[in-house]
Image: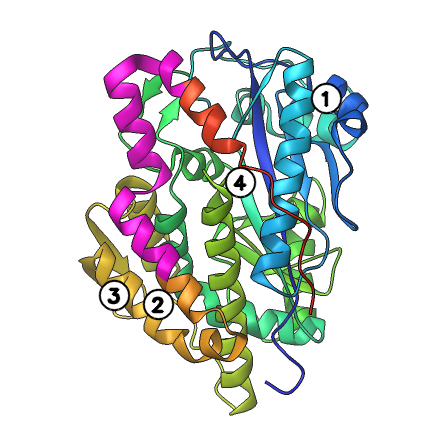
Amino acid sequence: MADGPPTMGVEEEFLLVNPRTGHASPCAEQVLARHRHHGPLPDGARVHRELRLTQIEAATGVCTTADELRYQLTAARRVLAGAAAAEDCALLATGTPIGPGPATPPPASEGRYADIDDAYGAVVADYEACGCHVHVGVPDPDTAVAVVNHVGRWLPTLLALSANSPFDHGRDTGYHSWRVVLQSRFPGFGVAPHARDHAEYRRTVGTLVECGALVDPDQTFWLARPSGRFPTVEFRVADTALTVDHAVLQALLSRALVQRALADLGRGREAEPLSPQVAAAAVWAAARHGLTGQLVDVAGRTRRPAWALVEQLLAHVREPLAESGDLAEVQALVAVLRADGTGSVRQRAVAGRGGPEVAVGWLTALTVPPALGTLRTG
């Protein structure tokens, strides 16, 4: 591509827990207050609290290469982990709590988070789910909507690749992404409805707000959507990544899907609307089975082995990955994931051998990557 691949950025949500017991620890405000003492964040990166004080989020700046993204993700994780340790907390990269803990975290006390608590009641009372959100740059809002239409069929496969939330406060749920099950309780969840343009998309969101189903236009839980804050398509499908490499893989695949969609739109190829029920079945199957069983091919409306759909996804984005110089890296990251298993598989194996307390220590170690050297540019 003459102007290079689209820009990308990642938002990572983490849990804060007692490092000895695994119980959720509401120390987000303290961690935020002291994070500057544990090293500078890269330019453009930022950290802030989330819905619960047991959660915290780190967001990268705008990145153009995998190396730049990996550097920013690594730096932010190390800064937050250092600040958390100083408050006798551990930073965990998991989609839902692995250790036992209070079933009802303390509610938000003010602002938008309090409005969310008030609107959704018991549905949100025990919500401590953490995701990995990828932003990919697009030219304009109408293009963002057209791209969202194109990427919908691939979202369940991205979810299966990211699965990293098998537990719910110490209970093995039998799912690979319990986070998605928790999110499915909210209106505005799943694969976004097909829209002709951004005006139609805005009308759909506005109607849900007017009906009281959403607190505001930013409250949708659609797994990919036009961002309301940035000139991007926002992928919200992935569980929080177990490792930086897993987050980089999600970002590169998401960017490649956008590149492929832009190329198809340039050729006059609009996406066909998907069956909402089949799309919902595909999301559920990915949450239930991860990469260990049969998933649903949304376009083909049939079940297929999970890894067959992964190979189909890789074939679909092979050309944009080659254009951006990311093909070899994605192939290597997928090979490691296939050999080692997703975060959900690995969490379950460690907890099965040593219990939740051992798994908390293991998760803590994997969350915090080794320091990287100064980012190479050029």
Q: How much space separates mark 3 and mark 1, taking CA atoms?
A: 46 Å
Closer to the eye: label 3 or 4: 4
Image coords of residue 75 (percent x, y): 66, 40
Q: How much space separates mark 1 and mark 2, taking CA atoms?
A: 39 Å
Mark 1, other Cα within 10 Å: few <14 / some 14–19 / many ≥20: many
Q: Secondary structure at mark 2?
A: helix
Label number found at residue 301: 3
- Locate the N terminus and report the quarter of the image it occupies: bottom right
Q: Secondary structure at mark 1?
A: helix
Residue 50 visible to the viewer: no
Image coords of residue 335 (percent x, y): 30, 56
> Which residue is denoted by mark 1 in the rendering?
31
- Nearest the camera: 368 or 198? 368
Image coords of residue 8 (percent x, y): 63, 61
Q: What residue is shown at x 19% (from left), y 59% (from top)?
A: 303
- Nearest the camera: 378 or 90? 378
Label number found at residue 131: 4
> Which residue is denoted by mark 2 in the rendering?
313
Q: Main secondary structure of the magenta part?
A: helix
Does 149 appear in magenta?
no
* Total numbered labels: 4
Q: Which span is picked out in magenta? A: 332-359
Cβ–Cβ under 8 Å for marks 2 and 4: no
Q: What residue is shown at x 75% (from left), y 17% (from top)?
A: 30
Does 340 appear in magenta?
yes
Cβ–Cβ under 8 Å for marks 3 and 4: no
Q: Amino acid at mark 2?
A: Leu
Earlier in the chain: of badge 1 and badge 4, it is: 1
Mark 4, other Cα within 10 Å: few <14 / some 14–19 / many ≥20: many
